[in-house]
Image (tube, grey):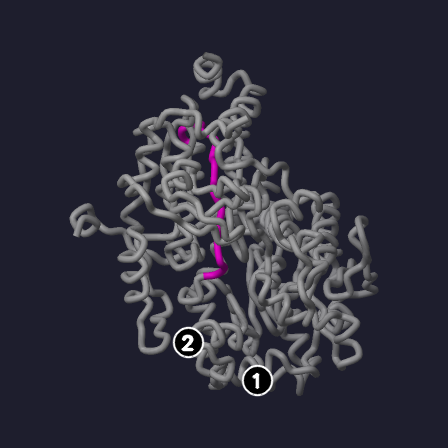
Amino acid sequence: MTTRTAWERVQLARHLARPHTLDYIAELLDEPRELHGDRLYRDDPAIVAAIGRFGAEPVVVIGHQKGASTAENVKRNFGMPKPEGYRKAIRILQLAEKFRLPVVTFIDTPAADPGLESEERGQAWAISSCLRTLLGVRVPTVGVVIGEGGSGGALALAVCDRLLMLENAIFAVASPEACAAILWRDAGRAPEAAETMRITAEDLHRFGIADEVIPEPVPAHLDASGVIRRVGSVLQRHLTELQRIWQEHGPESLRRFRWARYRAIGMWSEETIEQALD
Amino acid sequence: MRPRLRRRNTTSDEREFFGPVVPDGLWLKCPRCRELVYAREFERNLSVCPRCNYHARLTARQRIALTADPGSFVEWDANLVAADPLGFVALGEPYSEKIREAYQRSGEREALVTGSATIRGVRVALAVCEFGFLGASMGSVFGEKFARAAERAVEQGQPLIVFASSGGARMHEGVYSLFQLPKTIVAVEMLSEARLPFIAVLVDPCYGGVTASFATIADLILAEPGAMIGFAGPRVIEQVTRQKLPAGFQSAEFLLEHGMIDAIVPRHRLREELAYFVQLLTGLHSNMPTVPAHRQESKG
């Protein structure tokens, strides 16, 4: 693993030329077909979904989609999903469950869209439903943070049986800029905030939240296909393991394990009565 | 007709709610209508402005006193305190110091108070956010206390009622704060599997992770009049969109109109409404342990 500061990794995670979800879909799936729309309001270009064969098996893929140029980013809302994006994800997850297809998610967003319309259409409601659906599906799920894991908007696609992170990916409760603005009243101190917040793949792996860090010997924007292939082989290994658990313990088992996993995250201390009275 | 609360004699739970008697002759200025209100009248009206119906924020203890039958509340997990998983220091102040300050200011050890109580004789589990403790931000202790409350509710066959309020994430706990969202959702799934009602009352202000997790997957979502509720805060939205927000945006009334909540319930009706909803929902399953006795009790 290379040594870089957290702020350097933030820059790499946000790099415009870094491969995005559709690049992974194109490279890893045979004959993928993109699926559109939430069946309720419209198609959100900030979340994409596809079905296709991964190796021999059909899988469903859902991911945030950033643009590779400013023009594309405007179209994709910089990868910031609106409620219809999360509702698309929910619909596709239900499809995967119905036909017993494993789910792969790619996480890469600065945040859920914080706009007027998103609030009007229930952004918080869409995110909580998406979390609930992904936590509850009776099929194997593997999430890969390929770039920016920005807060609840990223989390909605991340609560999988396995959570993998690329070496230069990050996962944070708020952007370092926002954190610096809130805590130091100075967004310019973002590099310092990035360090303090513990947002690198290595940090999340140490916390036990990420299961595995996928190395980037060369940053992904300089070796897209190399990194994508590496992600593919790690994904394959985890999906095989999960499918074995699924077959041995039945369709209900995976979500039971998943629930136990997310139930357990947290750090606190329990005081004795004497300490509490002190 | 006079408001019913003014007609009633002071009951013991109201005394519990008011705390020390407010001295005579004290006046308050309502932050919304700017009218002067006699302080005691304001408090007797459950901190609702008698002129404009402004619902002022309450502490968790005031909420509990207002909701639970007098003396029925038994607190759970009051001994859980925040750890410092990141070793977080901001402006020279470590997180542990921040927690101590919040404790001294609010009298609470965390931003969520949980326990068991009866409401008009119906036994329920309660989880109440304390906005005075670091803006009711959701850290590990908050998440853990919520999950344990839900699990105890399942064990004891009780519905869960939550008063949800939050200003956002607990920055000092970083991703641990973020991963409390799935934790609370998993806890709600346990209640769902047991077919126990989960009712969320959204109170001012309710934002961020709390709104994007347990609060909005409740079986019933109620809100107090005028409560501000949303995912992103109004300041963030204005900054990002460079638009002035329309009047009433993100208010409980706005959300009701947009189909996001079941009903708006004024503060003085909440207790009765909660008891009523719980009875209706649990009454559907005659094999549920909490139902028959309480149903009869509450008819009197």
Quarter of the view holding residue B297: top left
Instruction: Bin the neighbour count of mark 1 within 10 Å (Cα to Cα): few under 14, some 14-19, many 20 and up.
Output: few
For the residue pair A217 and A248, the one nearer the viewer reads as A217
Residue B91 vertical position relative to residue B293 in the rendered view, above or below:
below
Q: Which quarter of the rendered picture does the C terminus of chain B lie within?
A: top left
Decide whether residue B75 is among the magenta residues.
Answer: no
Q: Which amino acid does label 2 sit on?
A: Thr
For the residue pair A19 and A162, the one nearer the viewer reads as A19
For the residue pair A50 and B149, the one nearer the viewer reads as B149
Q: Is residue B291 left or right of residue A275?
A: right
First in residue order: circle 2 vs circle 1? 2
| Range covered by the magenta-colored residues | B155-169
Rendered residue at 68%/53% (across/down): A102
Q: What residue type is labelled 1?
A: Pro
Q: Which chain carries label 2?
A: A
Residue B205 visible to the viewer: no
Rendered residue at 75%/45% (across/down): A99
Q: Which quarter of the rendered picture does the N terminus of chain B lie within?
A: top right
Which residue position holds label 1? A217
Q: Which residue lies furthest to the front in this view?
A: B25
Which residue position holds label 2? A196
